[in-house]
Amino acid sequence: AQSVTQLGSHVSVSEGALVLLRCNYSSSVPPYLFWYVQYPNQGLQLLLKYTSAATLVKGINGFEAEFKKSETSFHLTKPSAHMSDAAEYFCAVNLNTGGFKTIFGAGTRLFVKA
Amino acid sequence: SQTIHQWPATLVQPVGSPLSLECTVEGTSNPNLYWYRQAAGRGLQLLFYSVGIGQISSEVPQNLSASRPQDRQFILSSKKLLLSDSGFYLCAWSVEGLNNSPLHFGNGTRLTVT
């Protein structure tokens, strides 16, 4: 069965520091992977998606993620954290089940310290 | 461009009262539609999804039901709310028939059952 695991429910970084949010997937077929961001009391917003065109995917707000098949990983990074990046981040994989359901990781809450 | 509307934004209801949350999508046809719930400290739980008018798939047995009376309208209902129904409810849509389509979320409804 396909699933995603996000390592670390909370990550804290200083402003200007590297952001690294980890995601590992399990899939028997090439996956469609996504990162979403959720700000307080809002819905989720797509950050980026992997669709096999390129292993390094660039998204909005300076985020990027690298698909590594050998490690079954899709970690999210940003070179320099801003205070506005404080939010919850979800890794997700699409299932091809007719309705194309999406399975989400448990989420990682990012804290940015001044 | 496509937009998704979800209302109300917040709702406080007594135990045993009925519920109706509505979601509409504009700017696209034949979308896949979804209802998710986020409970405090828990991830996203898929409640229902729909691939067409009148076609509803339920992911978890519970006190809720969903209906799709029109192509771009998705309704979440309950006849009698339970305390455990409290949470943040999110409606979403994706492109029909597309494996790599991300989910597009509404801004959510925060439901508190008292």
Image (cartoon, rainbow, N blue to C red):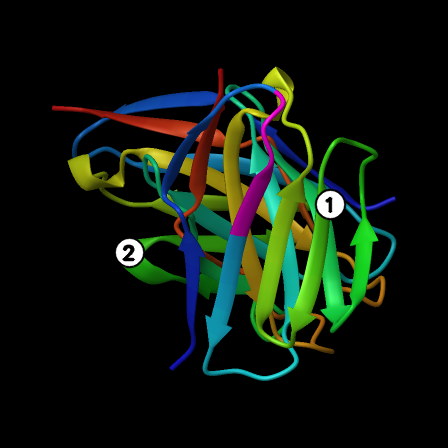
Above or below for B16 versus A107: above
Name the spot of residue B25 as percent of width and height, x first: 49, 71
Q: Is residue B97 above or below residue B32?
A: below
Q: Amino acid at mark 2?
A: Gly
Q: Answer whether residue B18 is magenta in the image.
A: yes
Indicate the quadrant containing the N terminus of chain A: top left, top right, bottom left or bottom right.
top right
Residue at 84% of width from left, 60% of height from top? A29
Separation of marks 1 and 2 at Cα, in angstroms: 40 Å
**Any mark on residue A62, and which?**
2
Q: Chain of mark 1?
A: B
- Residue A55 location, x and y as percent? 57, 64
Q: Which residue is painted at 69% across and 43% down in the image?
A: B46
Q: Closest to the observer: A12 or B42?
A: B42
Asked if residue B102 can be seen in this view, the reply is: no
Start and end of the magenta stretch? B16-21
Viewer-proximal residue, A32 or A70? A32
The reply to whether the C-beta atoms of the residues labelled 1 and 2 are less than 8 Å apart is no
Mark 1: which amino acid? Answer: Ser
| Residue that numbered label 1 is attached to | B65
Q: Residues within 10 Å of mark 2 (few under 14, many from 20)?
A: few
Q: Residues within 10 Å of mark 1 (few under 14, many from 20)?
A: some
Left or right: B105, with A62 as reference point:
right
Q: Image quarter for residue A3? A: top right
